[in-house]
Image (spheres, helix red, strand yellow):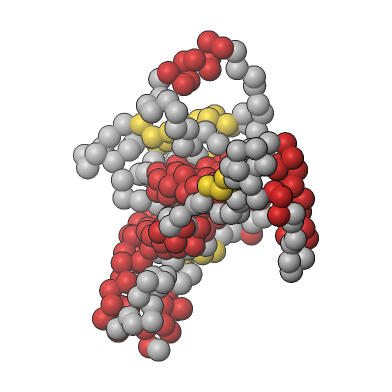
Amino acid sequence: MHYIPLNYEQINVAAGTYTPSTNKNVNNKTFQYWERSLFQRACSVLQFELPEEWQGSVRDFFYFCLFKYGYLAVFQTEELGKVFQPCTLNGYDFYYQPVTAQISNPKYNANLEIGKDCELIKLCPDYFGIWDVISYYAEKLSLLDNAINMSLINNKFAFLIGARNKTAGEALKKMLDKINRGEPAVIYDMKLLNDPQDKAEPWQFMERKNLKESYLTSDQLMDMQTILNAFDAEIGIPTVPYQIKERMVTSEAESRTIDATSRSVVWFDTISSSLVNVNKHFDLNISVSLRYTEEQEEVQNE
């Protein structure tokens, strides 16, 4: 990713047209990290059997196009053979389905008629990908990730002590050094207890109360796992909520399994239906399967 420095006017436009301007939920490294992480988790749901010439980095491009854009065009050329590309759909037929696919590639440009010159492999019935799902959960995880970092810093409990004078401050530093060094007992001069002139205490201690009632890191980490479980259930990865896994009955487990597979089953049916036309038109043998179906059956049997 290339970084281009922005001038004041560009920064002002970017910050002033975003509400609330103080929150940059997606313009940060943690959001990019979670986008990549969730995309790779989503790719694990579907297993494709692709032609030999579509393996390796071409296979990676296939997954990216399908999940990012929601569809891709399969066609054949004399120079390249049977290939696929992301495309732009145009036109409507009687059932409001696209008629043509515009291919725009530095090495190949064409406007292909669907069903005659090309066929579509489609992920969702509405011709959308799942990047909205990935971005939705990546934003939440990015926000919580920052909160966990702040919590880890703040939970390094430190003492707030105000020293009356420099002598008392230096004595406190020395005592804390010995405590942090692991000495079992620290002995200080009794003269430090009270100021010799006005008998006032040489330092004051600010106590941080009710630590256990705060939103602690352990709670935030559980919330992060809850969001990840929700994403997994959204894309078809079987999960068991940590809150009820010890007392989950059979009906609850089955309901959770159905919830976790409902959307992936729609993707599977849509892709399978589109692959029928692709395989028949170009004499291919592309197939798709759900990775977690057998594992879910074993869990239900247990």
Residue shown at 44%/66% (left/top)?
237
Picture coordinates of residue 81 (x, y %)? 61, 46
Q: Can residue 236 be seen by looking at this rendering? A: yes
Q: Residue furthest front?
A: 197
Q: Which quarter of the picture shows residue 252?
A: bottom left
> Viewer-proximal residue, 150 or 91?
150
Residue shown at 53%/17% (left/top)?
11
> Viewer-proximal residue, 119 or 184?
184
On screen, 283 above or below 171? below
Q: Residue furthest bottom?
A: 302
Picture coordinates of residue 233 (x, y %)? 38, 63
Answer with left or right where residue 145 lies relative to residue 136.
right
> Viewer-proximal residue, 90 or 10?
10
Picture coordinates of residue 116 (x, y %)? 40, 42
Q: Which quarter of the picture shows residue 1?
A: top right
Residue shown at 28%/74% (left/top)?
255
Answer with left or right where residue 194 lies relative to residue 63.
right
Answer with left or right where residue 289 lies relative to residue 98.
right
